[in-house]
Structures are given as C-alpha cells and as structure tokens.
Image: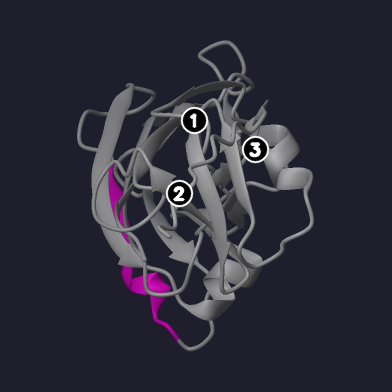
Amino acid sequence: MSTLNTSYKVKSDVNTDAERLAYNIENGAYVTTESGVWTVQNGNWVKLYPSGGYGSGIGWARYDDTQWTSLNKLPLLDGVSLVLNNNAGNIVLSDNSVNYYNGNTFKVLADKENELYMATVVFKYSAPNANQTFLRLQLEGGNGTPYERLGSDILFSKGNDITHEFHQVFQYYADSTFVSNGSQWVITASGGAAEVWDIIFFISKIQGY
C-alpha cells in the first residue's frame, strides 16, 4: 500500500503596512502587505520578499520641511543650540516599509543595532554678519557612541545676508540607544545670528540585519 503526499494551497489576506505595525509582535508570524512579505524574528519585523538588498528594510527616504521657507526662515541666535527643525511636510519613500525620521519629534530613527545608514543634510542659510559668524551642525544622541563626530563647521563666504547652500553626506551606524531613543541634528550659530530654510533630510539604510 502506497502513501501519497497531499498538497494544500493557503492564501493569506493582504493587509496594509499600517495594520502590520499595529499588530502584536509574535515570533513566527507571517503577514503579507502591499510592500512585501514579512515575518517576526527576535522581536522585530523582518522583510522576506522582496529583499531589496543585504539585510532587511534596505531603502531610502526623503523628508522635506515645509515650515521654514524663504518667506519664513528659522532664526538662529548667537550661541544658542537648536534642533534643526524639519516637519517632514513632504515625504518621498523607496517603499512604505521604511521609517528613518519623525517630523513631530525631529528625531532621526534606526531600526536595529549595528545597522549602517547614510544621511544627506541640505538647507539654505545666511547671516547679517558673515565675517564673524559660523554655524556648527552635529548629530546628537547615543550611549557612549561619539555621534558628535558627525558634524560640520559651516562658514559664510559670500557676504552679509547672501544666501548660501549647504549639502553634506554623513555615514553612521546605530547603537542600542539610537534605536531606542533616536537622535537629532543640532545646529548652533556662533559669532552672530543666522537663518536657515529649505531643509531636507535624505536618509538611506545601506546595510541591515
């Protein structure tokens, strides 16, 4: 007497990514959304298909501020540090699964510890006293990780009240505190007051786990 294997066809519902993120985290769960097929491993969502690259959640996101414009510039007082406000009023994503910044808390986000990210920071800036003023931009956050090394001293080379354009790329990895609490771009004017506007963050995860 022979034994026959029997195959079964199982079709799961297609949910939205918002519904997936609202589910309780349960190891071994499988969910299909518009962005792909997901499972839970070690307490985190892992994207199974399409993979998009090495690791999980590889992608990019662009966050444009819509509050601080040429008609309404973000004021920087001399010697006062301020979180670089980007309300993420306009967002462009490689797919709906990526989430690298929160426009309400102004925090840069990371999915998992030791993942590698690249961020491009763009804005326009000016100062009424260009000869004595400079800006300091740096990423703040982490638990013992020297994220303040991700920074730049920004000079005013074109003269008083002349518009300058800042564009710089930073690469960093996420430690456990970065994952838990996020981080923020902080800007400080020294030697005089200044203004910034047209702020854009372009963030890519270039290696995940």
Residue 18 has which mark?
Answer: none
Q: What is the CA distance from the residue labelled 2 to the residue labelled 1?
A: 9 Å
Residue in the foreground of this view, choosing between 135 and 118: 118
The mark nearer the N terminus, 3 or 1, is: 1
Task: Check if mark 2's residue and mark 1's residue have beta carbons within 8 Å.
Answer: yes
The mark nearer the N terminus, 2 or 1, is: 1
- Amino acid type at mark 2: Lys
Q: Is residue 49 left or right of residue 188?
A: left
- Amino acid type at mark 3: Gly
Q: Which residues are magenta?
A: 145-155
Discs 3/1, front: 1
- How many residues crowd around disc 3 within 10 Å: few (fewer than 14), some, or many (20 or more)? some
Of helix, strand and loop, which one carries label 2? strand
The mark nearer the N terminus, 3 or 2, is: 2
Q: In the picture shown, does residue 171 fall above or below 105?
A: below
The residue drawn where x is 54% and y is 40% is 8
Q: Quadrant of the N terminus?
A: bottom left
Residue 35 has which mark?
Answer: 1
Task: Check if mark 3's residue and mark 2's residue have beta carbons within 8 Å.
Answer: no
Residue 100 visible? The answer is: no
Of helix, strand and loop, which one carries label 1? loop
